[in-house]
Amino acid sequence: MMRCNTGKLALVCGIIVFQACRAQAALVYADDFEAETIGLNPLTPTIGANWFNNGNLSSNTVQANPLANAQNSSTRALQSERAGTPAGYSWIDLTPAESAQLAAGEKLTIQYQHYWPDAAKGGVFLGAYDNASHSFTNNAIDLELRAGLNRRFEYYNSATGYVNSGLSGTDNWDSITIVADFAANSWTLSVNGSSTAALPFTDNNDMSSVQTIMFGGSSGQTLAYVDNVRVYVGELPEPGAMCLLGSGVLAMFWFRRQFRSA
């Protein structure tokens, strides 16, 4: 009868699980604005093609981090500020190959931090679009942070207008994650670890992919900041699921070795 070497099996399983944790999402865009120039529009990210800026360029500029702390120790951040003037917009362009991966079934994950110091003013809204025209046409996601709503996160739907997501920000840096699933025609929003159920795309339609992602000031007066932008093709694994399973498998292997050598 063949004898199974459980120690080797545990090690192999652990390696497989950890590799799966690492390989589920590819980082395709990143910027913490540390290499950008204060007072100017964002230009050169750490990873990815250059930012594309349009609209009122003076309202979307890199500034000193107004709230550097343990939650966000960066020295610089993208500031959106305006007082009834036209907004400025900063766009992330995905490559054709990355958009094709989304159309083939990969999920899109967007992560960033957002600081909203004055709830009486608007925050930075995010849009995701299926074209490269850098205009407001055919958007899959329209995440709005409007003034006077106690830092409530809303999303826009063409059938119902502005919809309360049920999530709110704080007066500190908030961590935001968006995951778009084009196979399911839906997306989810997470703010500081609390998540929504699946949300419909803006026009309740079949969106096959995304080519551009935009950050800009919300309607009316705006004063808010964005930092540590990350875009992934794929969905990040839950830290409490597969990676912990891998840790458990490797721990089992280690304890077995310790028991045998005692």
Image: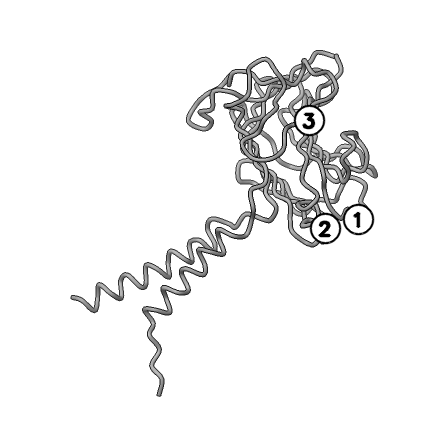
User: What is the quadrant of residue 95 in the picture?
Assistant: top right
Residue 259 in percent (x, y) is at 21, 66
Question: At numbered mark 1, what does the secondary structure look like: helix, strand or loop?
Answer: loop
Task: Tell me, for residue 206, which label it has, or none.
Answer: 1
Question: At numbered mark 2, what does the secondary structure look like: helix, strand or loop?
Answer: helix
Task: Tell me, for residue 55, which label it has, or none.
Answer: none
Pointer 2 or 1: first along the chain? 2
User: What is the quadrant of residue 143 in the picture?
Assistant: top right
Pointer 1 or 3: first along the chain? 3
- Classify residue 156 as left or right of residue 223: right
- Classify residue 253 as left or right of residue 14: left
Total tally of numbered discs in the picture: 3
Mark 2, Cα crowd under 10 Å, few <14 / some 14-19 / many 20+, is some
In the rendered image, the quadrant that contains the C terminus is bottom left
Q: CA distance from mark 2 to mark 1?
A: 11 Å
Pointer 3 or 2: first along the chain? 3
Question: At numbered mark 3, what does the secondary structure look like: helix, strand or loop?
Answer: strand
Name above or below for residue 237 compared with residue 227: below
Identity, as a three-letter code, of the amino acid under mark 2: Ala
Residue 200 in percent (x, y) is at 74, 44
Identity, as a three-letter code, of the amino acid under mark 1: Asp
| Residue to which mark 2 is pinned | 103
Identity, as a three-letter code, of the amino acid under mark 3: Phe
Residue extending farthest right: 159
Q: Residue at x 70, y 11 (%)?
A: 83
Q: Residue at x 52, y 28 (%)?
A: 32
User: What is the quadrant of residue 132 in the picture?
Assistant: top right
| Residue to which mark 3 is pinned | 52
Residue 82 in percent (x, y) is at 69, 13
